[in-house]
Image (tube, rainbow, N blue to C red):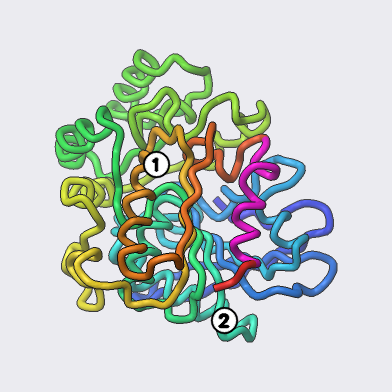
Amino acid sequence: MNSPLDFGEGLSAELVPFTAGDGMALNLIRVRGTEPPTRGPVVLVHGAGVRANIFNPPLPITFVRHLVERGHDVWLENWRASIDVPRNEWTLDQAAVHDHPAAVRTVCERSGAASCAAVIHCQGSTSFMMSALAGLVPQVNLVISNAVSLHPVLPEAARVKNRYLVPIVSRIMPYLDPRWGDHPTGVLPRILQAWVRLTHRECDNGVCCFSSFTYGAGHPTLWPHENLTPEVHEWIRKEFADVPLSFFMQMRRCALHGNLVALGNEPSLPKDLAAQPPQTDARFVLIAGAVNDCFLADSQRRTFQWLEGHAPGRHQLHILPGYGHLDIFIGTHAARDVYPVMSDALEHGA
């Protein structure tokens, strides 16, 4: 898949390649309007098994457009979990040490800014949080995190699935791919498709249903259907692809431990990310959908309490009623309900 560069009328996009610390070829997409930006750079970081284009749904006002129209210099990062880079069995540690620091350096060098902000989602959030707490992105002075950051808290059904099913599946196949909901490739994908069709009857979009099976235990998991337009619900068919079981195994370990833990292969990361104070002066603004069936809102509540224990009064927490996981960015009324919360935080500064 090639990363789309069409962000709609009045917006132009530039593909900016960069190299991760371990040599992997990645890229950023810089989006600008007809006038030069009047505010500093902000990096948008997608989740697992999607791509930077997840911030560009077919809506009149996307989060990208909202930020550009408010004068922000907007950069979207395609890190190693992106479906626009070659398939790889990535870990949070690799992204934290090699991807995000290199992306931030590239943004600051190309923009000429001494600092930047970051809006991070799901596993882009957990991996970027590892970077920030370990002091690997000192240029970042504000982090806005959606859904989960330091403390992954799963719904009970997902917790059981994560604890017992993930180790079994990881021995059988290295990846899961939500596209199998529409087009399974092989015997095991066809068996999984049949199981998903039996257990997920909430809609006739195979990718939507298989995404629910892949990422949690909800019906659906990643968004309440009532929060998506028919056009966006159809658009997601081409925005999800393979995700490695290596990631799920690490998230299993983190969920059992109660917070993010590194695998121990990267010396610059502490083993337990919550065992030491944050090695950053950045301010954190935590966002959670109140009805998130992928990670419970308690994920962000716990991280907020942890952050407050180190810097009382500096950080913010917003629990948004009626919102789930990804509809925070692609929901029908996100421009009214969600985007202003984030842009206000950006414009309040560090």
Give how far across and how far down residue 138 sits, in percent. Answer: 43, 81
**Residue 286 within the magenta-colored segment of the rendering:** no
Q: Amino acid at mark 1?
A: Ala
Task: Using the image as rendered, state which of residue 25 and residue 235 is in the foreground.
Answer: 235
Residue in the picture at 42% in, 57% down: 125
Q: Main secondary structure of the magenta part?
A: helix
Which residues make up the magenta segment?
Answer: 333-347
Give how far across and how far down residue 48 sits, in percent. Answer: 41, 49
Residue depth check, mark 2 versus mark 1: number of the one nearer the observer: 1
The quadrant of the image that shows the C terminus is bottom right
Distance from the alpha carbon under mark 2 to that under mark 1: 32 Å
Give how far across and how far down residue 84 sits, in percent. Answer: 50, 55
Q: Amino acid at mark 2?
A: Cys
Note whether 219 is above or below 281 in the view shown.
above
**Residue 340 within the magenta-colored segment of the rendering:** yes
Note whether 102 is above or below 312 in the view shown.
below
Task: Using the image as rendered, state which of residue 125 and residue 245 is in the foreground.
Answer: 125
Q: Are marks 2 and 1 in contact (CB under 8 Å)?
A: no
Instruction: State the residue position of label 1.
Output: 297
Task: Tell me the SS state at disc 1.
Answer: loop
Instruction: State the residue position of label 2.
Output: 108
Residue in the picture at 32% in, 69% down: 310
Give how far across and how far down residue 39 sits, in percent. Answer: 70, 73
